[in-house]
Amino acid sequence: MSARQRTRPSRLHHEPEAVTWAREKSGLTKRALADLVGISEQLMGEIESGWRSATPANLIKIAEALNCPIVALECKRATPSHRR
């Protein structure tokens, strides 16, 4: 039986560092935030580390629990460069 190798998602719906920063700024632990969102502490840790992508529904719940705008947590999209 071969060992299963974990890989990071190719695209995240959120910025992991932004979630961690907002959680710490609000004074919550991963467990407390996970409880407010209704997910496991393990999943919250994986979201913050970038190993799992937060679903759009969970990202909304995270933003509400942290009392911050969802755009502060969303993954930034590259903007096309403008020609002069």
Image (tube, rainbow, N blue to C red):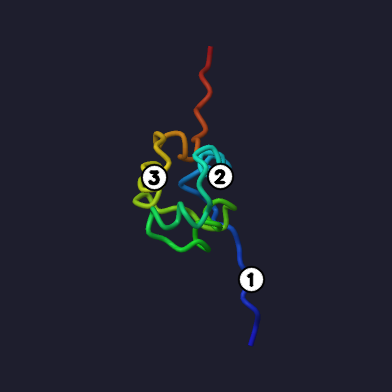
Please state which amino acid type lies under the numbered disc 1.
Answer: Gln
Q: Earlier in the sequence, mark 1 or mark 3?
A: 1
Would you say 56 lies left or right of 19 here?
Answer: left
Q: In which quarter of the image is residue 74?
A: top left
Q: In this view, does 21 lie above or below 34?
A: above
Q: Please tell me whether mark 1 or mark 3 is closer to you in this view.
A: 3
Disc 3: which residue:
65
What x and y, as percent, mark residue 16? Answer: 55, 46
Residue occupying the point 45% across, 56% down: 34
Return the residue found at the far top. 84
Is the residue 24 above or below the residue 44 in the image? above
Say which label, 2 or 1, has the lower sequence index. 1
Disc 2: CA contacts within 10 A as few (<14), some (14-19) or many (>=20): many
> Gap between marks 1 and 3, in whole Å?
33 Å
Give the residue type at disc 3. Answer: Ala
Compare residues 8 and 81 and report the one nearer the observer: 8
Which kind of residue does numbered mark 2 sit on? Thr
Q: In which quarter of the image is residue 38?
A: bottom left
Asked if the residue under mark 1 is in contact with the one under mark 2, i.e. CB atoms within 8 Å, the reply is: no
Q: 83 or 74: nearer the eye?
A: 74
Residue shown at 50% from the left, 61% from the top: 41
Mark linked to residue 5: 1
In screen coordinates, is 78 left or right of 67?
A: right
Q: Name the secondary structure under disc 3.
A: helix
Seen at 48% across and 54% down, the residue is: 53
Residue 49 x, y percent position in the rendering: 59, 53
Which residue is identified by label 2? 20
Residue 81 coordinates in the image, percent (x, y): 53, 23
**Residue 15: mark in rendering:** none
Q: Identify the secondary structure beneath mark 1.
A: loop
Kindly give the residue lying farthest to the front in the view shown: 27
